[in-house]
Image (spheres, grey):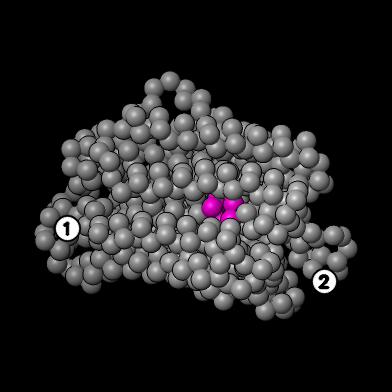
Amino acid sequence: MEQSTPQSKDAGAWRGRPSGLPSGVPPPSVPLAYMGAAVVGLIGCGVALVLSRFYAVTDPTNDHVVGAAHFAMLATLSMGILGAMHQFTPVITQRPLRSVRLSRATFVSWLLGAWLLPIGFITQREVVVEGGGGCAALAVGLFVFNIAPPLAARGKGPAATGLRLAVIGFSLTACFGVVYVIDRRSQWFDLSGHVVLAHACIGLLAWLGLTYLSVSEKLWPMFMLAHVPGRHLSAWLSIWSLFVGVAFLSPGLLLSITWLALAGALLVVIGLAAHLYSLFTYLRHRRRGRDLHQWFVLGASVWMIVGVILAAVGSELMTHDHHRGVAFVAASVTAIAGWLLVALVGHSYKIVPFIVWSALRARGISRNATGSALAFADLFNHPWSTLDFAIVNVGVAALCLGFVTSTSSLIIVGGVSLVITALITGANLSWRPVKLLRAGAHLTDPAQPLTPITQPATLRRIDASGDVTP
């Protein structure tokens, strides 16, 4: 279905590309590999949380809890975000990645690092931690080298600027992580809780959060059919405030400089508030009725607000009750991660069908099981996606309450909920496409031309029916 052309460096070259798909977009197997691995990573995260439940309520900085957190940050969130960046950076910049082979090498390296690191933390095997750190560092280097050509293009608006800054955040997170791994054996500086929190701050906000802010500025107009007139300055404010805020907040936490940390925290809050304002601006201008995707986005935003509140309460509590303060900070990190997780699951119900649809059309499959024209909505079960929305939010809520109240049973509920979320998401987004592939010979229509995805008429059909009808 796909191959790189040796005569060209176009990383988006693949055979059978549907008409209208941007030329720089890589073959479907590239982003789908990352997103499938993110589902498996979420299962690992849920299992690790259940196994670390007693450590979580007594000492949230214990290696077992740190391992579970790395399953969430590396094997789930970062894996899914990397898949989204491979898919949408060429769309945003209109330039291809350097190489499909580099994309695949990045995936393998990151997959190894994302699993070896948390396993090493949980089992306290330093050689495994070091091996995972090396694989993760290699993956970051390959990724930055591969994505540099499209991001080097000037302009392209706040989305491209945010992605450039997010790559810087990703690189800084990796550098911080390498120092962390080295210190575990050498212990050449005091790796206390505020140092680990400074590391988490960069990874959660300057890498994962900033990437989500940037990509969402392109996805929301498309998914909501919303056109916001003017320069939409809130997008710029959210991206720059978040990045500069982390640039102040992380050193402030690292060096225990209170005024610097407070200034950074204020800028971070301004950036997140601008992000919310941008979201509600798109919601006001949308031409599409309320759907589950919008509920996912709104639900995710609630966890972002909860995370900010918990962080403020935790920082205040730590001055006179260190244990409860640490518990609230752990809940804050969980809520911020929940913001990104709920958003990732919700967007996957838009992104994965879009990618799978192009892959099916490339194989000539243009009709669904009933013989009608194949639409994105045919590629997953909608009641199950609604159940997915409920369970992932229950899981995040249970984990936050479990940390705040030091209740291990709630940690179990949260971990099990994450496993169920992963199983539902993975099965729901793969079952129908697999059935269509198996029945492919009966669903092809060689005489029917492929409708360009970006054609205005197609957009009008989205507005009328609530889904794309190619």
Do residues under tags 1 and 2 come within 8 Å of each other at their CB atoms? no
Residue at 57 percent across and 76 percent down: it is 51
- Residue 172 screen position, x and y as percent: 70, 50
Which quarter of the picture shows residue 298?
Answer: top left
The residue under label 2 is 185
Kind of residue sitting beneath label 2: Arg
Kind of residue sitting beneath label 1: Arg
Can residue 284 be seen here? The reply is yes
How many numbered callouts?
2
Q: Is residue 343 left or right of residue 141?
A: left
Per the picture, the main secondary structure of the magenta-coloured stretch is helix
- Over which residues does the magenta segment extend? 331-337
Q: The residue tagged with tag 1: helix, strand or loop? A: loop
Most foreground residue, 136 or 335: 335
Q: Is residue 211 left or right of residue 36?
A: right
- Residue 192 screen position, x and y as percent: 79, 59
Q: Is residue 253 left or right of residue 96?
A: right
Most foreground residue, 445 or 468: 468
The residue under label 1 is 367
Q: In the orientation shown, which residue stands out farthest toward the left? A: 371
The disc at residue 132 is none
Query: Dot 1 surroundings within 10 Å: few (below 14), some, or many (20 or more)?
Result: many
Can residue 109 be seen here? The reply is no
Residue at 68 percent across and 54 percent down: it is 325
Most foreground residue, 276 or 150: 276
Question: Is 324 one of the magenta-colored residues?
Answer: no
First-in-chain label (1 vs 2) = 2
Q: The residue tagged with tag 2: helix, strand or loop? A: helix
Relative height, residue 122 to residue 350 (above, below): below
